[in-house]
Amino acid sequence: MEQTSEMQSGQGDKTSELDLSDEQFDEIVEIICEIDDPIELCECVYSTIESLLWRETDRDLLNAFSEKVGEVIGDIPFEAPAKDRETAIRDAARASLAILRNAREMRASRQSSETAPVAEEKTASSDDDEFYYLPPNLAHLLKHVEYTSPAPLEPMQKFETFRQLYETAIINKINNTLVFFHKQCDSTFRDLPRPFILSPAFSKNLQKAIEALIFPHIDSNHQVHILTPGVDWTNIDTQTFWTNRNTQLVRRKIRQLWARAWDELKLVKTAGEDGVAIAQIKENTKLLRSLLAPTTEDEYDIPRIANREILFFESMIDTPEDWLDSMNAIWQRCQDLYEQEIDPRVFQQKAREGALRDNILLACKEFPEQWGDFLVLLCHYVFPRISTRFLEQFTASLGTTDALREQRMPYLMRYLRLARINPKIKARELKEEEAWRSQSLELRNFLTGRAESKDLLHNKRVKSVSPNGV
């Protein structure tokens, strides 16, 4: 089961925390009525909408009402004489308050009944007013980035044997570590296959490799069999297995055997005939490479597995228990800064240049180093305007040469090497950037009343179909 963007497990019950009390809402109404600056009005109304609606569960309403705010504020004649502009601001404030009240009513209705029909918008404008909606080709510029996030596996219990418990606990922990990187954005196109950590198909292949090459080392160990009877495991699930005091001794032994099994797959350096050291590969390591190879070239990209990758796989059960919560918090900061700096919504506060880059660099210090590459690459695969040009600029913070950057983020540098030899990527990104700039300019002109087309008359609002149907 998948969740929409930003929706994480265990947060659905927090919706009510964002609801404003009647007193708070009345205070906001008073503030809006006194605002005489259109930009301040934009920011106040937009921030109030985000307080009324929970982005994770009310995204459809949030997008729809954000567009309507844009239409109302966009009708203000910014270049008109002061008196006319002041009157227009007052009218916009009244219309905005109607939108806010409507948003609040819809949120309350949705809370009381998920199946309740969405009410029609009530406005404070005169009867002869005609309201327009944004043209469909511009509507996405007022929406937050939309993507899907697969849900983590729920804890499992009631196993017939302790072996089934610890094997499932290991697989689930690794899957719940990797699932964070499996976000998908349908509107973002990339020419290259996903790096392996970002691919759900790789997760399945890794599970097969663990079952074939790692579990036999653990299952056949005599000490594990001796320690098992002393564990009251019948009421332990796959999550509490990692923290329950009853599993502490056997868990420590399982971790030792896990590390030893991966160590036995590492390449061993030996002296060649000419005295030059060469890496000797074992049969089981060849099998590991075979099991982790993608079915097709487009499925995912993975380098030739060597000791660096083996150490990486070994570390996957060492992620902290609050991994998903920590990563979701980091990701939310990345999305907020992306939207504020690189792909800003009309009424969002603009972030300083380089804010997203600095946040990612800081995030890479908050969790194990080997995951940093994939956080950057995930941004690239989810956020449309994180181009290879952004990635190249980002790597400048990692060192002065490619060799130094390779030491810090080898998988990111591998991706950029593949991108550099594909001329289609740069051409497509330039075309997409030109289209984005053109649409952004068209949106600004539209919202300030300067749009000119055969479908729009200057200073007249025209009714059209809303892409959201609201």
Image: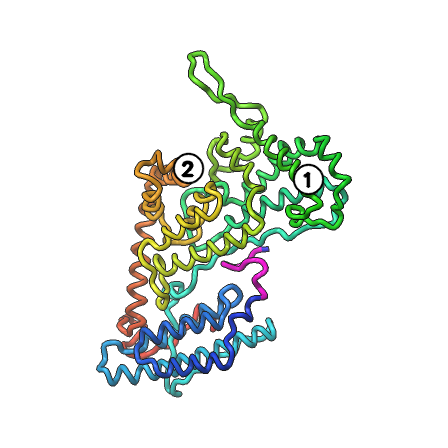
Residue at x 36%, y 49% (from the top left corner):
387
Q: Is mark 2 on a helix, strand or loop?
A: helix
Q: Nearer the viewer, mark 1 or mark 2?
A: 1
Q: Which residue is denoted by mark 2 in the rendering? A: 410
Circle number at residue 170 = none
Lower position in the chain sequence, tag 1 or tag 2? 1
- Dot 2 surroundings within 10 Å: few (below 14), some, or many (20 or more)? some
| Viewer can see residue 464 | no
Q: Where is residue 311 in the image (x, y as percent from the top left)?
A: 52, 34
Q: Position of residue 8 (x, y in %)?
A: 55, 58
The Cα atoms of the two marked residues, 1 and 2, are separated by 36 Å
Residue 5: within the magenta?
yes
Residue type at tag 1: Leu
Q: What stretch is highlighted in magenta?
A: 2-13
Image position of 248 with respect to 354: above or below: above
Nearer-the-camera pick, 235 or 335: 235
In the image, 295 versus 361, the foreground residue is 361
Whether residue 164 can be seen here:
yes
Q: How many labels does the image show?
A: 2
SS class, disc 1: helix
Q: Magenta stretch containing residue 403, yes or no?
A: no
- Residue sitting at x 47%, y 73%: 470
The quarter of the rendered structure image containing the N terminus is: bottom right
Q: In which quarter of the image is residue 349?
A: bottom left
Q: Where is residue 298 in the image (x, y as percent from the top left)?
A: 47, 40
Along the horizontal axis of the image, is 383 left or right of 157? left
Does residue 187 sit above or below 394 in this rendering?
Answer: below
Residue beneath disc 1: 249
Please, what is the three-letter code of the amino acid marked with disc 2?
Pro
